[in-house]
Image (tube, grey):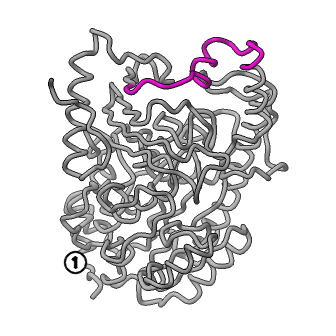
Amino acid sequence: MIKKVVLASLLVTVIFGPSYAQKKKAPQPPNIVLIVSDDHSAPFLSSYGYPQIKTPNIDRLAREGIRFTRAYTTAPQCVLSRAAIMTGRNTLDVQMTRFSAPLDASVTSYPELLRKGGYHTGILGRNFHLDGNRRVPETVTVLEKYGLETFKNRVDYLNVTGNRDSIFQQYTEFLDKAPKNKPFFVQVGYSDPHRIFNAKNFEPDPQTLTLPAHWPDTKGVRADFASYLGEIQRLDSDVGRVLEDLKKRGLEENTLIVFIGDNGGALLRGKGTLYDLGIHVPLIIRHPGLIKGGAVSNALVSGIDIAPTFLSVAGLPVPKDITGKSLTPAFADPQQGGHEYIFAVRGAHGQGLPTNSSNFDLGRTIFNKKYKLIYNAIWQIPYHPVDFAGQPFWLELKQQHAEGKLDEKYDKLLFADRRKMFEIYDLEADPDETNNLSGKAEVATVEHDLKARLQEWMIVNRDYLPLPIAPEN
C-alpha cells in the first residue's frame, strides 16, 4: 500500500523542518527517474570542471540540484557496480564478483521494494547486466533451466536495447502506460560513453583537450579521448530529451532525477582498475521541492547509497541488510552524510576467456578523504587494458614502449613487468595516484590501519581473496 501524504510530508519534515513541510506538501511520493551512463568517469562533465566539453542538460541538473564531487562505485566494472546500486549492498555481500553472474532471486532489489510500496516500476535502455549473459548458448541453457533470469518478475516494465531512439521510445511508452494514480520509478540506461566510440559529429577538437596528467600526450591518445568526450556530449543530448519530455508532461516538479555513471571509462588507468578513473563517477540529484539548486557535496558516497536514498524519499522503510546510507541528509546540508571509508572490488572481467581485456585481475581498495590503499591480489599480472587493447592509440603506445621512446614516467605506469602487491597514495598531494608510498616509514601507521580496516571488511563480507595482513611466523 502506497505511503500517504503523511509519510511524504514526514520525510520533508525530517530533512527540512516542520515549517518547510507545511509549505511543500506533495499529493503523492515523488516519481523517480534514474539515468545511468555507461563507463563514465567523474571529471568529464562541464559541471565537474572539465572545460573542453559541453553538457548543458546534465549541467542543468547540477545547477538545479546537488552535485556529489566524491561519488564512487563499488567496482570498476559494469555488472559488479550495477549489482550494488540495485541492491544497496556491496558486491561481495550479494555474490556478484564475476562479471556475467545473474543476481540471485533471494537478493531483493530496490525496485521490488518500491513496487511493493505502490510504485509503478521499469528498467529500460542499455543492458542492466544483472540477468546473466545471453551471448553464449551454453549459458542461456543454464539460465533457462534454473530460472536465473529474474528481473521480468521484479519490475512492471522491462525492455533492453542499445539503440538511442529505441531507448527514448521505450521511455515514453513506459510513461504513457504508467497508472496516473501511482508514482513511478524508471531506470533509463544509455550505452554512451561505452566503447565502441561512434559519435563523430559530437567530438571536440583533439588539440584543444586537457589530458589527465598521468596520460602520455600523443596524437593517438588525444584522438581517442576526443571520441570518448564526443560520446558524452551525445549522451547529454539524449538526457535533454528525457528532461524535456518530463516538462511537457507536467512531471518535473515532483520527480526526483538522478544521474550517475555505472563505473569509470575504458581509458588509460580507468575501467577495470581501482584508480580514480576506474571508480570515481558523476552523481547528480535534482528535485525542486527537496533540494536547493546549485548545492555541492564533498562527502564520500558510494553506489550502495542509491537504494536507501530512493526508499527514504518514497517514505518506505530501509531493510537492515542494506548497508548503504541515504543521501537525503545532504539535501538539506550538502556536507552531511556520507562514509568515513569507501570500499571497492575488482573482480573477474568479461563474458568469458580472455580476448582484449584483463579478465583475471583481482583486487580490493579502501580509502578515506586523505589516503587510499589498493591491494593487488594478483600482483604478478602487469597493467593491461580493459576494452581497448586493440585500439590504435594503445598500439601506438606499445610501439613507443618497445622502441624505448615512451617517457619513463608513463613507461613505469603502463608497462611495468609487474605491479606492487600494495599501493598507497596521498590523495591530497597526489590526486593522479602516481607516487606509491607503500612501505615507506612516513605512512607506515596509515598503511597498517587501512590494511586492518580492509581485512575486517573482507572477513565480515566473506571475501574469498587472501587477507592483506599475513599471520606472524
Residue found 55% across the figure and 73% down from its top? 139
Please state which amino acid type lies under the numbered disc 1. Val
Q: How many marks?
A: 1
| Image x and y of residue 266, in percent | 62, 43
- Residue 351 appears in which quarter of the rendering? bottom right
Image spot of residue 251 (x, y percent): 52, 74
Query: Quarter-wise, where is residue 367 in the image?
Result: top left
Image check: 347 left or right of 383?
Answer: left
Residue 259, relative to residue 333: is it above or below? below
Q: Residue at x 37, y 23 (%)?
A: 424
Classify mark 1: residues with Cα within 10 Å, few (<14), some (14-19) or many (20+).
Answer: some
Q: Is residue 324 above or below residue 2?
A: above
Q: What residue range appears in magenta?
A: 401-422
Instruction: Specify whether 211 is left or right of 123.
Output: right
- Name the one closer to the observer, 446 or 368: 446
Looking at the image, which residue sits at the far right? 201
Quadrant occupied by the N terminus: bottom left
Q: Is residue 402 magenta?
A: yes
Quadrant of the frame with the C terminus: top left
Give the residue pinned by disc 1. Answer: 6
Q: Nearer the viewer, residue 26 or 36?
A: 36
Can the viewer see residue 120?
A: no
